[in-house]
């Protein structure tokens, strides 16, 4: 089973120190059969704002624990659902629709309402992981039906000016 992590939770899930709740989610993704789904140009722009999340997702992608939905499919679907969304996160709803992912980690109440709206996210019903009381959502049922093995690597985020410099290797804790 897969999860979508909203931008308002990226730093909590992928940065250290983590709360017990978010450590549980990351442990499920890395070691217990879960996987992360991401994709679309809006989501990637949000991801680039959280460097630790970007680095960790690149590692998850290499390990087969993350799946990238085709950006064009997510972007096209986002334009279709945006007029019906009450939140400003049509790209998350589009990602759920394209990949058939039905677990979301978010604290955005408008997005949660959209995610649980059957007109926006068709059955099976979407569920939201907020804390350890929702651990029952973290189970391995099947891989995300709409997610496919990655066809491209996660590209580095654009930082404006390009400089040629040596980079230090950073070990990301899980």
Image: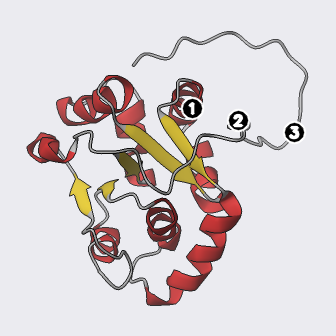
Identified at 45% across, 52% down, the residue is: 7
User: Which sits earlier in the primary sequence, circle 3 or circle 2?
Assistant: 2
Identified at 70% across, 35% down, the residue is: 153
Disc 1 packing (10 Å; few <14; some 14–19; many ≥20): many
Q: Which residue is mark 3?
A: 161
Q: Residue 36, how many percent across, how many down?
A: 44, 42
Per the model, the C-alpha gap separating discs 3 and 2 is 22 Å
Question: Which residue is more in the foreground, 1 or 86?
Answer: 1
Q: Which residue is mark 2?
A: 153
Q: Residue 80, how many percent across, how many down?
A: 57, 84
Q: Does the CB distance between marks 3 and 2 fall below 8 Å?
A: no
Looking at the rendered structure, the secondary structure element under dot 1 is helix
Question: Which residue is more in the foreground, 110 or 142?
Answer: 142
Quick check: 151 left or right of 35? Answer: right
> Which quarter of the figure has residue 23?
top left
Examine the rendered structure and indicate whether residue 98 appears above or below residue 25: below
Between circles 3 and 2, the one closer to the viewer is 2
Q: Residue 9, how many percent across, how many down?
A: 37, 47
Q: Which residue is mark 1?
A: 61
Q: Residue 86, how many percent across, how many down?
A: 38, 83
Quick check: 87 left or right of 109? Answer: right
Quick check: 11 left or right of 157? Answer: left
């Amino acid at each position: 089973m897969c999860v979508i992590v909203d931008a308002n939770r990226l730093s909590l899930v992928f940065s250290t120190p983590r709360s017990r709740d978010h450590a549980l989610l990351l442990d499920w993704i890395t070691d217990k059969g879960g996987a992360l789904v991401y994709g679309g140009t809006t989501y990637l722009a949000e991801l680039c704002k959280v460097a630790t999340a970007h680095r960790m997702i690149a590692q998850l992608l290499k390990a087969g624990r993350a799946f990238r939905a085709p950006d064009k499919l997510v972007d096209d679907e986002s334009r279709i659902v945006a007029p019906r969304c009450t939140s400003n996160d049509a790209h998350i709803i589009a990602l759920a629709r394209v990949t058939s992912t039905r677990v979301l980690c978010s604290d955005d109440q408008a997005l949660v309402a959209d995610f649980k709206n059957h007109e926006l996210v068709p059955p099976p019903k979407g569920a939201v992981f907020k804390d350890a009381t929702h651990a029952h959502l973290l189970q391995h049922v099947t891989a995300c039906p709409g997610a496919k093995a990655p066809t491209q690597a996660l590209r580095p985020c654009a930082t404006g000016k390009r400089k040629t410099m040596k980079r230090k290797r950073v070990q990301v804790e899980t």
